[in-house]
Each structure stands twice: as structure tokens, then as C-alpha cells.
Amino acid sequence: MKEQNKPIGIFDSGVGGSSIWKEIITLLPSEDTVFLADSKYAPYGKRSKKEILELSIKNTEKLLEFDCKIIVVACNTATTNAIKELRSSYNIPFIGIEPAIKPAAIHTKTNKVGVLATKGTLSSELFAKTSDLYAQNIEVIEVIGTGLVELIEDGKIESTEMYDLLHSYIQPLIEKNIDYLVLGCTHYPYLIPILKNILPDNVTIIDSGEAVARQTKAILTQHQLLNPVSDRSSYHRLYSNATIDTLKEIIKPTLSNYSAEKLDF
Ligand code: DGL
């Protein structure tokens, strides 16, 4: 198969990366995609760097079996812990995602920014570097979203449990007068409707999904890997190695050109 006709590969520790997948298929409607939700091993946030790297390699190998032309690591925890090693081990472009501290640091008026992410992301070297680089003159208040990924993986987004847990994480940030909340986990965009109920109107939520899609397009263009047929009908294959029901429910598909199945990987 010609390189340009190959699919874009995307993986996450679970169903959350589908928030990135949606941005990619919206921006690049002619591209085929393969999305892997590694839900069997979620959450990654509690795992060691070594484990996260091993799981990221396993997912990469699977996407290479599907002959993907680029790999989007749609997981902040995997990006911040493993993308450097992935890039040096494989001869294929990788796109990653990190908490978007830069735009929050540029625009904050209260000089206080909240970051909600997993333990694995917040304790990573890459996050510390990015934070040092962009947030020197502001206060970054980090909150570990313990339990949020698990509830999303269990299909409990709209539960009282979720509301109460989120409220307990967000209330202290409101009291500290943040005006930006950075979502540092690709599962969290699915919590935006609840977050909007909890946060006052002056707090802006930032997630990096659209930026990742734009970066994917830019790198495909740079490597001359964009599918040249602009009006082709694309096809999307979505897989989970746990139950497929959560993934099907969360993507609430309005499209017909896709399949969602359980797969061992
Ligand atoms: N979606 C993953 C991320 O962006 C969730 C991590 C986890 O499984 O703990 O970090």
C-alpha cells in the first residue's frame, strides 16, 4: 500500500483518547484511522515509568501491524513518560499530548492556573520541564485526578459519584482564584459539561485535543503523508481490549463509516 493511503494510528490507556480521535477525524476527514483503547491496563496514571513504556511499546507494535503511517499517543501519561523512547526506537513519526500550560500561563490574569492530570503526568520529567519553561511567574496548582479515569472507564460519567469527586478536586482551585483550568488527561474532555457546572464563569477550561489534530496534520504534510484524495470516504477501526461497550457509548457516533470491536493486544 502507498504510504499516503495508510491509516493514522492512535492509542490511549483507555477510552479517553477517543476525544483526540474525534478531533483528528474532524480535521482530517479523508484519513483512515485505527484507535486502540488499552482499557485492560488502565489507568496508566498509577503505573511506573517502566510499565508505561512497556505498554506504549505494546500498543505501538499493534498499530504497526495495522500498517499505520503515523502514531498519535493520545495519552498525556504515555506521552510524558514514553514518547522520547518511542521516537528513538521507531522510524515513524509520533505525535504526543501534554497539558497545555503555555496558553494558560500567557492569558491568566489572576496568575493562578489549575492543572488536573494523573499522578504519572504530574510527576514526569517532561511536565516539570514544560512547567519550568512557561510558568515561571505564575502559580501552577496541580491536582491529581485520582479515580476519574476509573469512573469514565466504568461508564459512570453522569453519576453522583463523579460529580462529588470532581467537586472535591475543583473547589480548592476555585478558592485559590484560578482563572484557567488545564485538562491534562485525554479522558477529561468528557467531563467538561460537569466541570462547567462546578466552575464559575470566569474560569476558562483548556484542553489540547484540537492542537493535537492540527499538529498531526502539520507533521503528515511535512512528511508528505497526507492522503491525496480529498473527497474519499474514510474508514475508522476502533478497538478496546476490555469491554467495547464503554467505547461505543462514549463516542456516541454520528458516523456510519466505522467499526468498534474487542481485540486482544
Ligand atoms: N487518557 C490518559 C491520559 O491522558 C489517562 C491516563 C490513565 O490511564 O491514568 O493521561
Image (spheres, rainbow, N blue to C red):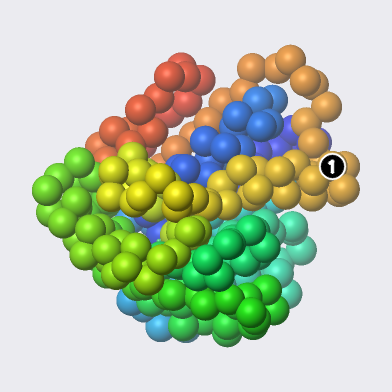
Instruction: Kindly tell me whether residue 44 is visible in this rendering.
Output: no
- Asked whether 193 or 56 is in front, the reply is 193
Q: Position of residue 170 (x, y in %)?
A: 30, 62
Amino acid carrying label 1: it is Thr
In this rendering, the answer to whether 180 lies above or below 9 is below
Label 1: state its secondary structure: helix
Q: Is residue 260 above or below residue 93?
A: above
Q: Which residue does the image show at 28% across and 50% down from the upper left?
A: 198
Marks counted in the figure total 1
Residue wearing tag 1 = 221
Given residues 86 and 158, the one toward you in this image is 158
Q: Quadrant of residue 126?
A: bottom right
In this rendering, position of residue 158 left or right of residue 182: left
Classify residue 165 by image quadrant: bottom left
Q: Position of residue 214 (x, y in %)?
A: 71, 43
The residue that appears at 40% across and 45% down in the rendered structure is 201
> x, y percentage for residue 257?
51, 20
Instruction: Give x and y (percent) for residue 40.
Output: 30, 59
